[in-house]
Amino acid sequence: MSTRRSHPALAAITIACALAVAPGVFALTTNPSQRGGDAPPKGGVVIRLDGDLEVPPEAVHALVVVVEGRAEIAGSVETVVIVGGSAVLSGARVGELVLINASADLVDTEVAGDIDLIQSDFTEGEGVRVLGQIRRGPRHHFLRGFWVFGIFLAIGFAVTLLIAGLVAATVTPHGVRMAGHMLSDEFPKTVLWTLLLWIGLPLAAVLLIPTVIGIPMGVGTFLFVLPTLGFLGYLITGIRLGDWLVGRWRHAVEQPRPYRAALLGVGLLLLLGLVPFVGGLVAPLAGALGSAALVASLWQGIQGGATGLEPA
């Protein structure tokens, strides 16, 4: 038997998508007392990576995922996902069948829902009933898993930024506020530093990469220096925005540590990033301007004989 190989990342994403599309996966129950009427029971989730799996006739599962293996299914499964392998369904009851770079043989099997084929094929033997549709190519309902992961990723990133803003407000309140005032009080200078930093520095890194000594410097600039500056700049812009809003709202003197400003400003930047069309420009502009203000304040502090990050 020959099996087709699939990329590991595709396998992981497929499992996530399967969890998103499987009906009832998040409301599983194996307790007969919780089932009403003659409704078929819903079992658990079975995932097999790089191995074979057998589902006997008496077995009941809500979701079965097999990656780079062979599945022999004779029981009842609500959703079957095969990635880069093969499957034999004989005497099975299946709610939905998803094949990704895989093949399947169906004999005396009932598929109550749809069969989704993505670079895959299947053969029908005797006694096969497909009550749904046979669809080729990815479908919107299958890609819901990407939306699920995207939402969780966005929430995690937002929480990380809010926590980072609080950390910055705790560790170096004077430094972030000094850079923030540079951003608002000397905006033309900040724009000049932005052009110098985000055009000149990448250009210098590109010129360094062809040389043996400059390879680590150039690659490090793109992988570490610029992302770190953008991250810090985003926090600085957010805290400065929050300070301005708190001052306008309460007409109060700035607190020693801008906790409220960090939460308010960074949170507002995150919300602005959700605005269609213009939201995609919020994070790059905030990061670029804030990082330029940080570098400008550091340079100004060095010229004045101080680092610019320590309180006077």
Image: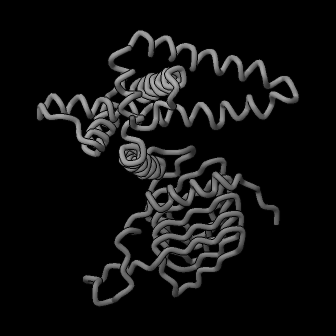
What residue is shown at x 80% (from left), y 30% (from top)? 215
Give coordinates of residue 296: x percent, y percent: 49, 21
Give coordinates of residue 79: x percent, y percent: 49, 66
Relative to 12, say whether 302 is above or below: above
Q: Can you say which quadrant of the picture contains the C terminus?
A: top left
What residue is shown at x 34% (from left), y 33% (from top)? 238
Give coordinates of residue 306: x percent, y percent: 50, 29
Number of numbered tags placed on the structure image: 0
Q: Which colour scheme is used?
A: one colour
Q: Is residue 174 left or right of residue 70?
A: left
What residue is shown at x 68% (from left), y 55% (from top)? 8
Q: Can you say which quadrant of the picture contains the N terminus?
A: bottom right
Residue 222 vs residue 239, the one in the foreground:
239
Give coordinates of residue 40: x percent, y percent: 37, 79
Q: Quadrant of residue 178?
A: top left
Q: Can residue 222 be seen in this view?
A: yes
Q: Quadrant of residue 276?
A: top left
Q: Is residue 210 left or right of residue 128?
A: right
Q: Can residue 284 be seen in this view?
A: no
What residue is shown at x 44% (from left), y 65% (from top)? 112
Q: Residue furthest right?
A: 212
Relative to 197, say whether 115 is above or below: below
Q: Quadrant of residue 242?
A: top left
Residue 148 vs residue 120, the one in the foreground:
148
